[in-house]
Amino acid sequence: MAENKVNRTIEPVHQSVAKLLGSQHTFQAPRYQRNYAWGWAEITAFLNDMNRCVRLRVAKENSRHHFFGGLVTVEAKVAGSSRTNLQVVDGQQRLATFAMLVSQLKRILLRLAEKLEGDDPLQQTLRKRAQLLEDQYEIFADEIRLQNVDVPRIQLSEPDQPFFSALLAGAEPKPDRKSHELLRDAYKQIGQYLDDFVQEADGNVASAAERLHDVHEVLKSDWTIIHMAAGDKADAYMLFQVLNDRGLSLTEGELLRSTTLELLEPLVGLPELNEAEEYWNDMLGGDTHIVRNAIGGLYASQVGQWPSKSTLLDDYMIAFFPVTVGIALDGRTAAELLQQVRNLKEDFDRVKSISAGDWPFPSSQAVNQWKRNRLRLLILHLRYTDAIPLLVSACQLKDTVFADLVRLVERFAFRYAVLGDGNRGRAVEVLNGHAVSIRRDAAAFRLGNLRSDLAALSETYVSEETFRQALTNMRYSRTEATNKPLKYLLMTLEDYARWHTDGGQGSPTCRDETRILDFETGTIEHVYAENTHPVDANLLPLMDTLGNLTYLSSPENIAAGAKPFSEKRPYFIGSSSHLNRQIGENASWTPEVVEARTEILVTMAIRTFTI
């Protein structure tokens, strides 16, 4: 229904960039939309697009069309004015860059005019062209309550507009934020391109002017954009959401930022407003993909599923800022909204911490480094990010319970997702369901209930026999990145080896948590290696199987190398590794020993990864 509403109220207009900029509209970014963000790479791409089009015109060849995508706006009336003022929901970056291009065109036209004598007709032509650019694309001559007012056709969000205006006026304003530096650098980069372009005319002012005319022609004829003007902000945001799924720039977080700050502005003091804005700036300052996943994960931790693509903004507002739903804010509820922004920031920081494999609690003797390291293994090495919503919610639990939960999910992830082919959707449903339960009542959470649900999933989708077969089929690969599951398995079996030797009763337990194996520097090595001499033709077929592989620290690997087993054996006997000492108990290394060791490791793994 929502998409049909957009189709009824919005008529997209496909037009040239020059026609868009020279229309009876002015464009204004909402105060709290994100600041200017295009850097060197984006401006370089912009100028490359320009260069491809303008070079064809200079060579008097066919023109080249370039489509700049969509611009989404919503009307924002100005009291006493007849002009159409449009708030820019998506497209501020492109509009600002178009404006800087026009400004630099005008600057160079005026500079060329200064090179000519006062009676040269070309001087007047160049000045008229410069004035035409200003009148058509830079300044809108408005009349507000019988007063003539010159209004910038393009206005950025409030923190950037004074700097942007001074920049276009030819001043050298001092930047005091990152977006100002980006605007300054973009303006200089565009100006440098045009300077170099006209210098190709070898000092001939007329030729240089023609080159600038060709640039203007690109704006007038070759570059096009689709302008979609919505009747109200709800429709504009809905349209944005549809377009954003196709790769446009604005993120859900930026819409949330704009919406919440606009709601707070009339009801809280400047310190509180600045506090909320700083929270948003910090949350949205990273990579767009990471930000989007973080916010989506937080939503899933509260609702149990990812938001619907057709009602994205509304879903997020209900989940994160419930105080805004169905009521007009007052001073009290505005304070609640500010607190909800604080809460989101705290959760967002937890997501960033967990996503980096970092322990989200203060250091505590109750949770040692070995236990904290399991989170790093789960997220960075097993790459089981589906658990992040649950882990974020579980930050409300005691750190000791969180540690037990991580170890449970870690073992489940290896069996179910890494080695098995379990149904991902069902696992996400279970994990997110427990995330929501913790959010609602952390005190009622019982790890046993999660264990029962994960055990049921494992038995249904990755039975013991299926898991056994997958373990038996594991092979060492010459592509190092694909060996992470093997390395994780061997390290984990080493961690639990003494527990197995002691009978393996109860839940898997590491008997020595003071020893932490290093995933990054440790290596998987062959007991019988590829370069071993003399060659044993009977062991060659088993060389990459599980029974012939072991985990060695870097020093152990350097010492053992590709020596025959008889020379390696002392290293195994004297190793600090329980599993390596077991290898050293063998007087020789034969196919029968390798196959028997494979079965031992598989049996240990089945027991270790039984949920």
Image (cartoon, rainbow, N blue to C red):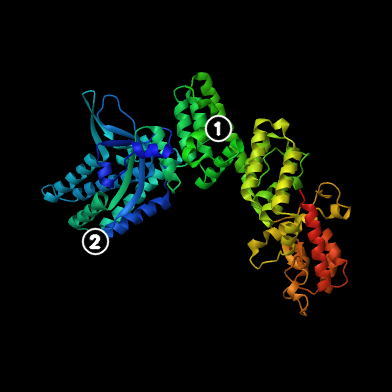
Image quadrant assignment for residue 350: top right
Pick the residue in front: 276 or 431: 431
Q: In this view, does 356 lie to the left or right of 115?
A: right
Q: Which label sits on residue 600? A: none
Vertical position of residue 91 compared to residue 200: above or below: above
Pick the residue in front: 374 or 106: 374
Vertical position of residue 310 compared to residue 83: above or below: below
Pick the residue in front: 52 or 497: 497
User: In x, y percent, where is residue 424?
Assistant: 63, 50
Note whether residue 282 is visible: yes
- Three-letter residue code for mark 1: Phe
Tell how many labels: 2
User: In x, y percent, where is residue 264?
Assistant: 47, 26
Q: Mark 2 points at which residue?
A: 62
Q: Name the residue under label 1.
A: 320
User: In x, y percent, where is residue 135?
Assistant: 22, 39
- Three-letter residue code for mark 2: Asn
User: How many other residues sit within 10 Å of disc 2, few (<14), some (14-19) or many (≥20)?
Assistant: few
User: In x, y percent, where is residue 406?
Assistant: 71, 44
C-alpha distance separating marks 1 and 2? 53 Å
